[in-house]
Image (cartoon, rainbow, N blue to C red):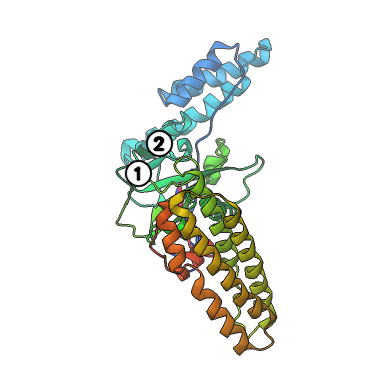
Amino acid sequence: MSIPPPPGPHQPQGPYPPGPYVPPGPWGYGYGGYAQPVPVNGLAIAALVLGVLCFLPAVGLVLGLIALSQIRKKGERGKGMAIAGSVLSSVGLVLWTLSLTTGAAADFWDGFKDAANGGGSAYSLKKGDCFDSGTGALTGETYDVDEVPCAGAHHGEVFAVVKLPGGAFPGDSAIEDTADDRCYALQEAYAMDAWAVPKNVDVYYLVPSEDSWSFGDREITCLFGNTDEDRSLTGSLRNDATNLDADQMAFLKASNALDTVLIEEPEDYAEDDLPANTDWAADVDTVLGEQAEALRARSWSAEAERPVAALVKDLEDARKEWAKAADAEDVDTYYEHYDAGYEVIDGKTTVTAREALGLASTVPSRDEDYDSGSGTGGAGELDV
């Protein structure tokens, strides 16, 4: 597997981040299952077993060829297993031969066998798992990963696994584009509180390679990793329904809806495209109204009731400024209300409400967060 570098402003990481970086290669290549119908021909079974285990590959190849001959003559089942055993034995024989002179093939084959058995590889990772990459980095190539406890130091944390449809290999670029789009879109469902995600964390992914695709690998594994290749993560970044209470969930859903529209700010400044910016300001006005209504309608705990009420009042004040920005007919007027509206967002009342709810209360850098979350950040990719 290989991890591609993130697009845009980010830098690629090991099997992880999408964003303003140039995405690195994908992780999770070449680990598929081999579900076959129960064979009747005994040599077909033996050939497959020897092929998967890479044990006596020359014998496995011979048994596979003999089995195919017997199956044709006797009409027995097991043709698929005989073919698979022959192919795997052939590959094993080549790698075994190379390893005699270079020793390089041994590591690859060990990783391949682990993957095929669903263990010790990117292919076996699931949502919530933490791991160390085989190379110590989240970019480049690796043949194995080691699952480790999230409480300790680790290279990556899986926040989503995306299943790809079957068919012909779509190409590295197509898979990386899908990984970039899907992984950034899914990160919020796992780490709902963006304020709790350190600024040195970005999104990465493991994607199938053309070789792993041929063995049944159809998964994109979305990960969080450290943007500093020499440093690891410590502790889980997960904050969702598994570890948040009802009040925290309700607050974050309303807050994230606003963050989503703020991320969509036009790339062109108002002086270059005033209509696009006033249209966006109108969207912010609308979402602020929805957020204030959602917060107002909920019955909060005694500790959070007054702080949330104060925040709602500020949101309504901010909404008035955004409404005026939306109606602005010149750039100066637009920016006057734009600045006034932004002063309230993520201001003191937001921090106080978060503190009352037991959520992260350190205001993140808006530029960094929005760049990363917009899908223009850099995604890292690791190929197997």
Q: Check the image and report above or below for 258 versus 130.
A: below
Q: Mark 2 vs mark 1: which is more N-terminal? A: 2
Instruction: Between label 2 and label 1, give the one nearer the viewer.
Output: 1
Q: Is residue 14 at all visible to an observer of this figure?
A: no
Position in image of residue 332 (x %, y %):
60, 89
Position in image of residue 110 (x %, y %):
38, 33
Position in image of residue 360 (x %, y %):
40, 56
**On the picture, is 92 further left or further right than 235?**
right
Q: Residue at x 60, y 14 (%)?
A: 39
Q: Callout 1, which amino acid? A: Gly
Binning the other alpha carbons within 10 Å of mark 2 as few (below 14), some (14 to 19) or many (20 upward) gives many
Q: Are marks 2 and 1 in contact (CB under 8 Å)?
A: yes
Q: Callout 2, which amino acid? A: Gly
Circle 1 is placed at which residue position? 134
Q: Check the image and report above or below for 276 versus 66.
A: below
Binning the other alpha carbons within 10 Å of mark 1 as few (below 14), some (14 to 19) or many (20 upward) gives some
Q: Residue at x 51, y 21 (%)?
A: 48
Q: Check the image and report above or below for 4 versus 114.
A: below
**On the picture, is 156 further left or further right than 205?**
left
Say what secondary structure mark 1 lies in.
loop
Q: Is residue 209 at all visible to an observer of this figure?
A: yes
> Hey, which quadrant is residue 361 in on the image?
bottom left
Q: Residue at x 47, y 67 (%)?
A: 346
Measure the alpha-carbon separation of dots 2 and 1: 10 Å
Q: Check the image and report above or below for 367 versus 98.
A: below
Q: How many marks?
A: 2
Circle 2 is placed at which residue position? 111
Of the 4 image quadrants, the one containing the C terminus is top left
Say what secondary structure mark 2 lies in.
helix
Position in image of residue 27 (x %, y %):
47, 47
Front residue of 169/200: it is 200
Front residue of 369/325: it is 325
